[in-house]
Amino acid sequence: MESPGGERVEVMHLDCLGRLDDQGIAAQLGERPIFLSLARYEPFGLAVLEAASAGCALVLSDVASFRELWKGAALFVDPEDAEGAAAAIRGLVEDPDERLRQGSAARTRSSCYGVDAMTSGVVAVFRGCWTGTPVRSLAGAAA
């Protein structure tokens, strides 16, 4: 495999899927019941959102942004703790009911961050500007 900078690295256990459209990404994620991200910094995490939307159980690094977005809908591990991440994944593999519960919680939470939620939020901001009503009140009423 070659990086954009021209560096080459040999990887084992990696299937390069090529370029995927939205449906291809959803199909691949739908076949994989657990999604892992050990990012040390992530302002939002579109890949996590795609995995959650596909119903994957989430194992995420314990960073503030992930905790804010996914608390109650993911398992959190220290991004430096590979053994802890492996244990979290193993626990989900060994307990299919918990894996399904976590995947369902992630899918439910993902709906808060989709196009409909974003559109409602933008409309609430415009409505607040026109009416002089605080946006938090409008957003809270819409939820």
Image (spheres, rainbow, N blue to C red):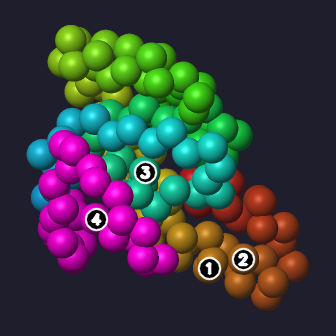
**Disc 3 from disc 1: Cα separation:** 25 Å
Front residue of 54/25: it is 25
Q: Splitting the image into 4 quarters, where does residue 64 fall? A: top right
Count of marks overlaid on the render: 4
Q: Which residues are magenta?
A: 1-26
Front residue of 140/6: it is 6
Q: Which residue is mark 2?
A: 125
Front residue of 128/86: it is 86
Secondary structure under badge 2?
helix
**Disc 3 from disc 2: Cα separation:** 26 Å
Q: Is residue 141 left or right of residue 81?
A: right
**Disc 1 from disc 2: Cα separation:** 5 Å
Does the CB distance between marks 1 and 2 fall below 8 Å?
yes
Q: Which is in the foreground here, disc 3 or disc 2?
A: 3
Marking on residue 1? 4
Does the CB distance between marks 3 and 1 fall below 8 Å?
no
Q: Which residue is mark 3?
A: 48
**Disc 4 from disc 1: Cα separation:** 45 Å
Name the amino acid, label 3: Val
Q: Is residue 13 magenta?
A: yes
- The x and y percentages for residue 142 are 59, 60
Marking on residue 123? 1
Q: Which is in the foreground here, disc 4 or disc 1?
A: 4
Q: Which is in the foreground here, disc 4 or disc 2?
A: 4
Does the CB distance between marks 3 and 2 fall below 8 Å?
no
- The x and y percentages for residue 128 are 78, 77
